[in-house]
Structures are given as structure tokens and as C-alpha cells.
Amino acid sequence: MRIPRVFCDGPLASGQQALLDEQASRHLLRVLRLRRGDPIVLFDGSGRDFEARLGSGSKSALTAEVGDVQHCETPPALKIHLAIGVSRGERIDYALQKAVELGVWRIQPLFTERSVVRLSGERLASRQAHWQGVVRHACGQSGRSLIPALRDARPFDRWLSEFSGRGLLLDHRAPSGLKGVDHPGEEVTLLVGPEGGLSPTERDAATRKAFQAIRLGPRILRTETAPLAAISALQTLWGDFDGPT
């Protein structure tokens, strides 16, 4: 039986008693039907997995006895930053979940000219918390101990005005693909639009800001498919798909 991995908010240390949140507690008791003393694995996003044993508590707040460090995750050789236009709920959730599974290092949601979803105030805060949950859950499922940084959603033009570094813009109109891209070095930003893509004004602004436009074959990919294909290609060429470096 696979030992469950559970995210615990806050720094963990061997020998301490950790308090699990309501969602994790209910999942362990009601879904997995674990009991006191059963083994689990805890991670706090710092890169370390800890052996642990389920303790006492209620269905909404269990405790766990933290044991030894089981595993330490090192930062990847290629840090992929995903800047993605906010799309409808299921699409952005799917893109975030799978990007985390594929090893993305940082995520920046963007509101673009063609973004159908417009959020502000409490609705934006609620959606941001939901996205954070998606990212953490994907880490738990995929065995990642370093949680990708999820930035607050921002307007495209404001984000681009502060951007520095090197970037790749996914655009099916681009003349060439990844074969025309030099080794990105230690990190690279991948820019993907929402449904309908980026506007011509936004694409022009991005290319003037050192983004190189690339295409992924002769097909037009959906907003939730394109970043995953690109991340997989980057990981194959320069990342960790061949194993740890």
C-alpha cells in the first residue's frame, strides 16, 4: 500500500507534533480510513519529506508525530517559469496541475486582453487560494517536495513592464520551433495566452521584451495543452527527464 503524502503548512522538524488541516484530516480518516499510528509522509514545501505517524485529534484537526527526514529534493537544473493567461476554471486548473507534475518552478497567472475570466477583490482572493490548493495537491500526488511559487495574478502589461530575463512565447504563427532556440541556461520563462491567445499588441510587446516566439508543430494547441507540451519538450532537451543531474 502506498503511504499517503500530506502537505503541512509551516516548517516541520523531527520530533515535533504537527497539526494537519481540515481537508487533510478528513481525507485521511474518511477516504483512506487511516487510524492512529498509521504511517504517513509529511512535506512543508521546503524540499524535505518527513516520516510521520498519525496521532490523535478530530475529523477536522488531526495531529501527526514527525519522524526523520526521508528525502530531500534539490532544485532543478532548468527552472521553468510559466506565465499563463487566466482561462476558464477547469482549463486553468488542469494546466496548473499538470505543469506542477511536469516540474515547473514558478507560475504567474496573467489577465490579458482576451481573458474571459475577470476577477477582483474577494473573488480573486478565493480563486488564488483555490489555485494554491491545486498546486499543493499536485505536489503531493507527484512526489514533489519543493512547491512551485504561485504568484498573485496580475495584468499582462504590468507584469511585462517589470519582466527581465529570457522568455519563450508560444505562438502557432512563429516561423520555427525549439530547434531554433539556444540553450536557455539555468532558467527560462514560458509565456502562454488564454483562450484565443494573446492579442497582436501583446505579442508585439512580448517580442520587444526579449521573448522569442516559437511554435509547437503545425497544429494549434489549446491553452491547457500548449504549456504542457512545451514544458515536456524543455525538460527533454535541457531539464531532468533524463534523471537527476
Image (spheres, rainbow, N blue to C red):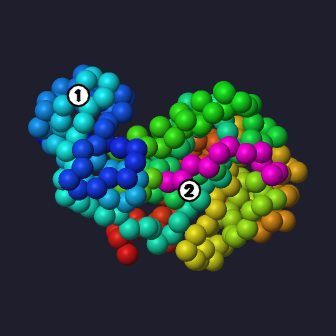
Query: Pointer 2: residues within 10 angstroms few (<14), some, or many (20+)?
Result: some
Residue 180 in the figure: left or right of residue 16:
right
Eyeballing the image, is 228 above or below 168?
above
Q: Is residue 154 magenta?
A: yes
Looking at the image, which residue sits at the far right? 201
The structure residue drawn at horizontal position 57% and vertical position 49%, both measured from the top left corner, is 150
How far apart are the alpha carbons under marks 1 and 2?
35 Å
Q: Nearer the viewer, residue 230 or 154?
A: 154
Which percent across, then down, holds residue 161?
A: 82, 59
Q: In the picture, which quadrant includes the N terminus?
A: top left
Tell which residue pokes out farthest to the front in this image.
16
Q: Residue at x 51, y 41 (%)?
A: 132
Q: Quadrant of residue 179?
A: bottom right
- Total labels drawn: 2
The answer to which image quadrant residue 33 occupies is top left
The amino acid type found where label 2 is placed reads Arg
Of residue 46 and residue 177, the one placed in the foreground of this image is 46
Residue drawn at x 24%, y 44% is 17
Residue 191 part of the magenta-drawn span: no
Tell me if residue 117 can be seen: no
Which residue matches tag 2? 106
Res 57 label: 1
Q: In the rendered structure, which segment of residues is drawn in magenta?
A: 148-158
